[in-house]
Image (spheres, rainbow, N blue to C red):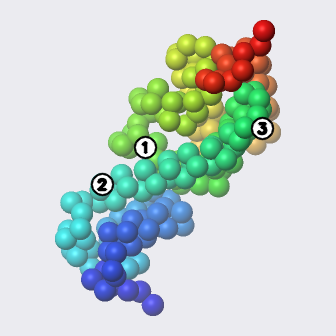
Amino acid sequence: MARGVGKVKNAYEEMMKEGRRLLRVGGPAAVSLRNIARGLGCSAGVFYNYICNVEDVRQHVAREVLGELRASLRVAARPGAGAFRLVAQARAYRSFWRMEPGSFAFTFRHDSPYPVAKQEELVGWFWPDLARLGTEQEGVAWYTRVHGLMHLEISRVLEPAMAEALWQDLCGGLAAAARHQAPEPGAPQAA
């Protein structure tokens, strides 16, 4: 049975959880104050005691999605050789977004709090290993390839077999680039 938001101890958190749930089940268009209110059993007007507008909810949900992605990439970056970590992270990135295609579209929409224009920031935030592939520009270029390929796959611009072949090529290129990367900070230097 739905709960009224006034009866919820942590109303703000409940609204954000409902926004995230709606994104998972209904995609970006489902994240609205009306739908969140319906899910919590209250009127949308109640929300203005807690938030300014639906964009507050969308920004929170986008940050939450990226936090989940970051956690997934950290798990993939377990200690090991740089090349293996980078390929594992690329695969984790792909796996995460394939499980959350609506979240990808929502998080990287043109008016997102994390627009594609901030790719340099995303590279450092997600994949510090990419920054060691050479220049910052090279790290951004690799991230752009991974992100762009993910966009094409989720948008279904690519046939599944073509997407798979391109991912294999991309991972091979990442592994080759990582073999020549700068060593990790604090890593023992070869004599």
In x, y percent, where is residue 97?
Answer: 61, 48
Q: Mark 1 and mark 3: span between their CA atoms?
A: 24 Å
Residue at 78 percent across and 9 percent down: it is 191
Q: Mark 2 and mark 3: span between their CA atoms?
A: 35 Å
Marks 2 and 3: which is nearer the front?
2
Q: Which residue lies furthest to the top in this view?
A: 191
Left or right: 5 in relation to 91: left
Q: Nearer the viewer, residue 162 or 171?
A: 171
Whichever of labels 2 and 1 marks the residue nearer the N terminus, that label is 2
Left or right: 42 in relation to 169: left
The residue singled out by tag 1 in the image is 109
Label 2 with label 3: CB-CB less than 8 Å = no
SS label for mark 1: loop
Left or right: 20 in relation to 150: left
Whichever of labels 1 and 3 marks the residue nearer the N terminus, that label is 1
Whichever of labels 2 and 3 marks the residue nearer the N terminus, that label is 2
Q: Mark 2 and mark 1: span between their CA atoms?
A: 13 Å
Q: Give, as a three-letter code, the residue at label 1.
A: Arg
